[in-house]
Image (tube, helix red, strand yellow):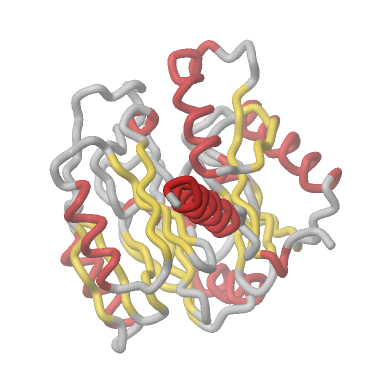
Amino acid sequence: MNVIKKLVIILMMLSGLIMIFSKNNHADGKIYTGIPNANDDYYQPFKFDIKKLQFSLKSQVVPYGDIWIRDVAPVATSRLVKFKYSPDYLPNRQSHKIDAEFRKWLDSNQFNYTTSNIVLDGGNFIYNGEDTVIMTTKVLSENPKYTKADLIDELKSVLQVSKIILINPEPGDVLGHADGQVHFIQPNVLFMGNFEGNIAVKKQIKVAMPQVKILDLISNYQESGQYDEQIPSAKGLYINMMETKHAIYVPQYGLRQDKDALKLVRQYTDKQIHPVNVSKLSTLGGSVNCLTWYCPKELLPK
């Protein structure tokens, strides 16, 4: 009887592992992560942490020469839209090379996407899953050839959405990315970090979207350990979570606020919650959303 009981327990454990694997196997889409070139000294101290992240997410690795895949990848609404990757915080030669390598990978894997000459990082794109996109006003300065009205109209058209909400970037943020400020946890429920100037941003969003419920999500910004003098660390930035159809991947930093952030996220979603340790990688200036690209199943190559 003891032997039979042991066998039953083992079978139950194996069944559980299979279920966990299948749930994390992205049947609803795929999670992608980037990898730097082997001779890239800048990322050398983080090689182990990059591999650990890729393993924990069971992601497909894209060898395009960098780790900030979110910014160069297409954004997803009802279609994939590939914007021009030419941020002002990188030399043109570097950003153009990264962009070309990523486009080459997209095409070799037969992704179907629409292109746009508008300059926009994927990190400056927050979608509510229905009809609304939030981005910072950085998009205006990156596209000076457009008037504000024309740019918004063009963005609505190419993204196939009805509303574009522009918000102030966080003061001192050289990237100007909205994914360090806000995240839609439901179509009409928005998490907002406690960054400098967030009261004004709340007003901007409420004027454009009166029905939205805005919730404060704690952050515990850690300046110590910043790796790059030019780019502030993202350690303690919980807002930079990544969401798929059935799961949310929440940053964890080894801080006492980690559990509080998880608790709040769980209160507003039925999706599976996966804590992701990015304590070291975040000192580079980005977190989980910055380090990943999720492509829904319906937009993957056939």
Q: Can you tell which quarter of the image residue 134 is in?
A: bottom left
Q: Can you tell which quarter of the image residue 268 is in?
A: bottom left
Q: Is residue 145 above or below residue 150?
A: above
Is 229 placed left or right of 97 in the picture? left
Quadrant where the C terminus sits is bottom right
Is 1 placed left or right of 36 in the picture? left
Q: Is residue 245 above or below residue 242?
A: below
- For the question of whether residue 185 can be seen, the reply is yes
Q: Is residue 2 above or below residue 187?
A: above
Front-most of residues 244 and 22: 22
| Residue positioned 78% across, 40% down in the render | 105
Front-most of residues 220 and 71: 220
- For the question of whether residue 141 can be seen, the reply is no
Q: Total label count? A: 0
Image spot of residue 42 (x, y percent): 49, 16
Image spot of residue 257 (x, y percent): 16, 47
